Image: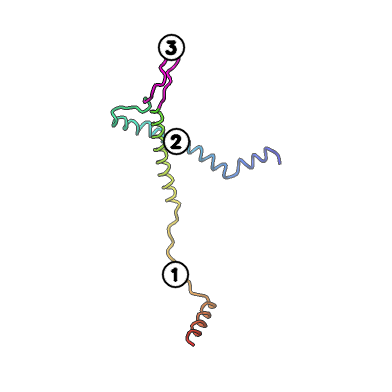
Amino acid sequence: MSFIKEFKEFAVRGNVIDMAVGVVIGSAFGKIVSSLVGDVIMPVIGVITGGVNFTDFKIVLKQAHGETAAVTLNYGSFIQTTIDFIIIAFCIFVAIKAINKLKREKPKAEEAPKEPSEDIKLLREIRDELKNR
């Protein structure tokens, strides 16, 4: 089997295409949620906290000297990324919960018990007859 033929079979397999679509949609969804966090939620949090911008929080480990930049521990960026993650995880949770709710089948009405077969009826009659003796 040639390399190109093997690759073609691999590339058009359903799972690979589904995964590629998932990656593209996931990337777009991530951009939407990042915009939601950065453009809608964080400004509100900034107003509530008195205009604090989390990305500005840092600890200077070594001061800048001449052309050498300062060495900083940017824990504010970590806080911002953590908030982004929590919001993205929540949005994905809500989306998956909605999809699962749509997928769930409606519970079927309980079926009436089927009438036993002739063999079962006959065996029951024999059992009852033996008990009566």
Q: Is residue 111 above or below residue 78?
A: below
Question: Nearer the N terminus, badge 2 or badge 3?
Answer: 2
Q: Secondary structure at mark 2?
A: helix
Q: Which residues are magenta?
A: 57-74
Which numbered tag is attached to residue 30? 2
Mark-to-mark CA distance, 1 and 3: 87 Å
Q: Is residue 54 above or below residue 92?
A: above
Query: Quick check: is 66 in the magenta stretch?
Result: yes
Q: Which residue is mark 1?
A: 112
Q: In this rendering, which labeled residue sits more in front, label 2 or label 3?
A: 3
Question: Nearer the N terminus, badge 1 or badge 3?
Answer: 3
The answer to which of 29 and 91 lies nearer the viewer is 91
Query: Quick check: is 45 in the magenta stretch?
Result: no
The reply, left or right, for residue 19 in relation to residue 88 is right
Which numbered tag is attached to residue 66? 3
**Residue in the picture at 51% in, 40% down:** 22
Q: Amino acid at mark 1?
A: Ala
Q: Coloring scheme of the render?
A: rainbow
Question: Nearer the N terminus, badge 2 or badge 1?
Answer: 2
Residue 26 in picture, x, y percent from top left:
48, 38
Mark-to-mark CA distance, 2 and 3: 40 Å
